[in-house]
Image: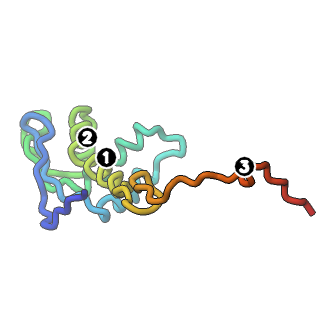
Amino acid sequence: MIRLNLTATPQWLDLAPGLRLLVGPLTTALMVSARADPAIEGLPDGASQEELALVMAKAVARRAVLDWEGVGDDVGNIVPVSPEGIDALLEIWPVFEAFQTQYVARGLILDAEKNVSALSPSGPSAGAIGTARPAHPSRAARAIAPTAPQD
């Protein structure tokens, strides 16, 4: 069952000790926009799945991250959210993995769930219950049928 969040309010994601991101809902519009990101369109034809995953995660994050806590520059000054900062943050392996798992994967799980239907109680599915008795072929039906004539 898909549970709808009709409030569509941003949520905080705790990605690492002391690091959290405020993200907007993972909507169809956000994903479509991320897929059309110039960085994705600029990938070479032979780009690996890993390269695509990183570029896609960055494109999604640039659209989804509204605020953050626990992000600073090299001397410890708090850094405001920016596209460059988001890209740099996702270059940190544990942060990338946490973002993929806690945010992006939720959307992919829902995408996979939409392709699953409950078994039908009637009709040709694994959940259907047979209502007719098995047929017992007559002697004539068991005989070898002649091949169809070819014109």
**Relative to residue 14, is residue 48 drawn left or right?**
right
Amino acid tagged 3: Arg
Tell me the residue at 21%/38% (across/down): 98
- Disc with the residue nearer the chain's start (2 vs 3): 2
Q: CA distance from mark 2 to mark 3?
A: 68 Å
User: Circle 1 sits on which residue?
Assistant: 57
Q: Which residue is pictured at 44% across the width and 59% down the height? A: 131
Any part of residue 80 in sight: no
- Please state which of residues 63 and 133 is positioned toward the viewer in this rendering: 133
Residue 95 image-quadrant placement: top left
Nearer to the camera, 126 or 46? 126
Q: Nearer the viewer, mark 1 or mark 3?
A: 3
Task: Report the residue marked by disc 2.
Answer: 90
Residue 12: % across, % down: 10, 50
Crowd class of label 2 (few under 14; some 14 to 19; many from 20; radius 10 Å): many
Q: Quadrant of the C terminus?
A: bottom right
Q: Is residue 51 above or below residue 123?
A: above
- The crowd level at tag 3 (other Cα within 10 Å; few <14, some 14-19, many 20+) is few
Disc 2 + disc 3, Cβ < 8 Å: no
Q: Is residue 82 left or right of residue 113?
A: left
**Sequence-first disc among 1 and 2:** 1
Q: In percent of the image, x 27 and y 42: which residue is there?
A: 100
Tell me which corner region of the image, top left, top right, bottom left or bottom right, holds residue 1: bottom left
Q: Amino acid at mark 1?
A: Ala
Q: Nearer the viewer, residue 116 or 143?
A: 143
Is residue 11 positioned above or below 19 on the image? below
Q: Is residue 64 visible to us here?
A: yes
SS for dot 1: helix
Q: Which residue is mark 3?
A: 142
Q: Are marks 1 and 2 in contact (CB under 8 Å)?
A: yes
Instruction: Find numbered disc 2 in the image and state the secondary structure of the residue it sits on.
Output: helix
Q: How is the image coloured?
A: rainbow
